[in-house]
Image (tube, helix red, strand yellow):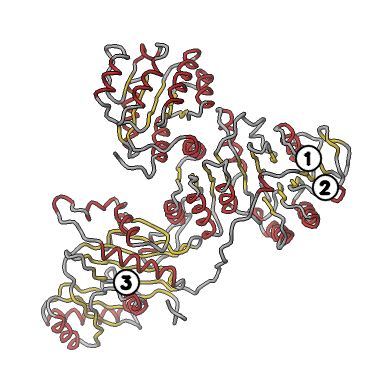
Amino acid sequence: MTATVPRTGTWGESSTRDLLAPLELPFVTSVRVTHSDEAIETALRLGGTVVLKAVSDEVVHKTDAGLVELKLSTSDEVRAAYERLDQKISVLGLADAGIVVQEMAPEGTDLFVGWNRDATFGPILIVGLGGVTVELFRDVARHPAPVTAEQAATMLDSLVSSRLLQGFRGAPEVDTAQFCGIVARVSRLAVEAPEIAELDLNPVRILPDGRCLVLDASAVVLPVQDSTTPAAPGPDLTTLFRPRSIAVVGASREPDRPGGKVIRALRRNGFRGPLYPVNPAGGEIDGLPVVRGIDELVNTPELVCIALPASASIAAVRECVARGVRAVMVFASGFGEVGAEGAALDAELRDAVEGSETLLCGPNTIGIVSAHHKMAATFSQAIDRFPDTPSGVCLVAQSGAVAGSLVSREISDGYSIGDWVTVGNQTDLDVADYISYLAGLDTTRSIAVFLEGVSDGAAFRRALHTARDAGIPVTVFKTGVTAAGQRAVASHSGALAGSQDAYRAVLEEAGAIQVEEMSQLLEVASTLADYPTPRGRRAAVITTSGGAGSATADLLTLNDLDTAEFTDGTAQALAGLLPKFASVANPLDITAEGAFTPGLFTEVIDVVAVDPHVDAVCIVLTSITGNDAVRVANEIAAARSRSDVPILVTWLVARPLAEAGMTTLASSGIRVFIEPARMAAALRHLTKGTSRV
């Protein structure tokens, strides 16, 4: 917007008006005056009732400081107000202050628009109700800049208070079209003027005819820090995830050491390519001949896993780069995560691959696993052997311990992971690189991300967009959602800013799903990978307990889902199947007698799933155990194989009592939840973007 900015710091109303002049925003008429007689003359010229303000860059919140005089309609009132403001300016010692006369804006609806420039993602637009309510209720919507007028309208619709704009209790609907146009213009400025760190237009009053008046404005201007890097396509990570040959430097005969675990994991899980243990001692490890160094290898491996201490790992990486190895993986910790000394090692490691064609995963990673490629390049104890069928779910994690724990639970419950990586310190490749690559694989159906934070917000957004454009849903569990403290802020936008708010806005804008519980991460990602998108949001509940059925119906409603109303034909068909004392309404309790009738589950699901009012089927099983558990699981699986609507199952009994049945469902591609609330949440995410029929 401007070639140079005359000064940095907080800008009050008058200065911000000048700053925004190129936008030609509909500011309320404002005239600066220097004495009381001039104020009276100006008030008479404006006609009607006026407002007097003392404007200063030293005091942004003028009302709190008593620097606003409202509803002045006579010359005496104007003179008295001017004198009071002049005295307050003197008492407060405001060297830059001046007094302005403004027309008193007509009654209308006050809204707020502003932005805060997030350190990671850049400007985040914020809209909400205006005046002091914006901070009091914090009912705001956020979106990365820029936004269109249509997106601004969607932001307003998402507010809890949006009903106030839509004609609440007989009030006229508020015409927000011009306001949305202002939001779009302001959002473009957020991108074009990096020197403006924060901006408030508050309030922006919408008059009954839809015209807008900007009544107040403030800004924070800071020096521009040019950290922009040109966008580049994500690197091809094939040699990391699908290497044709692997060497393990630091391979060990001791099975409990990382170098021993990696060799045995690769062997145990059937890696098909050449595998070279590397150890100066030579000999044999796990039946494989050992070479004493990378330079002794006849053929250059595509991937080298380095299981050495931190300082020795750097030398090994340099050897690999010199040899032309396409990808290396450094397991060692002791780099940037441990302080200045480690950061220096991190810099050396970065320098070792800088400018080369060698990809670096880590350091401080537990490795990469690909069930599709039969490759377990990891020392994690999360896997013993791959499940028979690889999953379309991928996991990108910034915590190795968490990733291993979540994966181990998935595998023990009968599910699988297709590809997973723990990114470590991201000295070379980062989360965005892995998401972009995995989104391009034809084996990927869903990506789960355990996220602590990103340093390149633009690259992360591009990666999310890459996945979205490829039709690959991304599910994120974000840590660090609370701030240890906040700096003092001079604007509403600053007060409303937060790292978690920025991440949430970026994830929502890219269509990613943020889950609140760690254990939901792979659960939701698996649901998104394995189930078709429902045609609507209406669910049928089939249960073996009336209490569980009514509770599940409540949970569906709390997750913005509808309880389907069965057609008369469905009700009649169910009446012919169930015991005479059973109700045929939704939620449908098939009763204990029905639960132990062979074949009944299949018949009931077949009837319910074809009802045109049903978009998904939620089954809640209670104390069905042993052989009955296997029978019921097979009946549900048989019905699922014929159904084109999603069928989700919650099984409330202790897992050991029905493990065979639960495993049967998992092997049939049916997700088993331990709690109806988590099933309802997963279905809500699955229906994201679908409309009510």
Residue 38 relative to residue 140: left or right? left
Q: Residue at x 25, y 81 (%)?
A: 100
Determine which quarter of the picture holds residue 151: bottom left
**Residue named by callout 3:** 217
**Residue named by callout 2:** 299
Q: Is residue 8 visible?
A: yes
Name the secondary structure under disc 3: strand
**Residue named by callout 1:** 274
The Cα–Cα distance between marks 2 and 3, rounded to whole angstroms, is 67 Å
Q: Quadrant of the C terminus?
A: top left
Whether pointer 2 and pointer 1 mark residues with C-beta atoms closer than 8 Å, the reply is yes
* Among numbered discs 1 and 3, the one appearing first in the sequence: 3
The Cα–Cα distance between marks 2 and 1, rounded to whole angstroms, is 10 Å
Are there few (<14), some (14-19), or many (20+) residues within 10 Å of tag 1?
few
Q: Is residue 311 visible?
A: no
The circle drawn on residue 23 is none
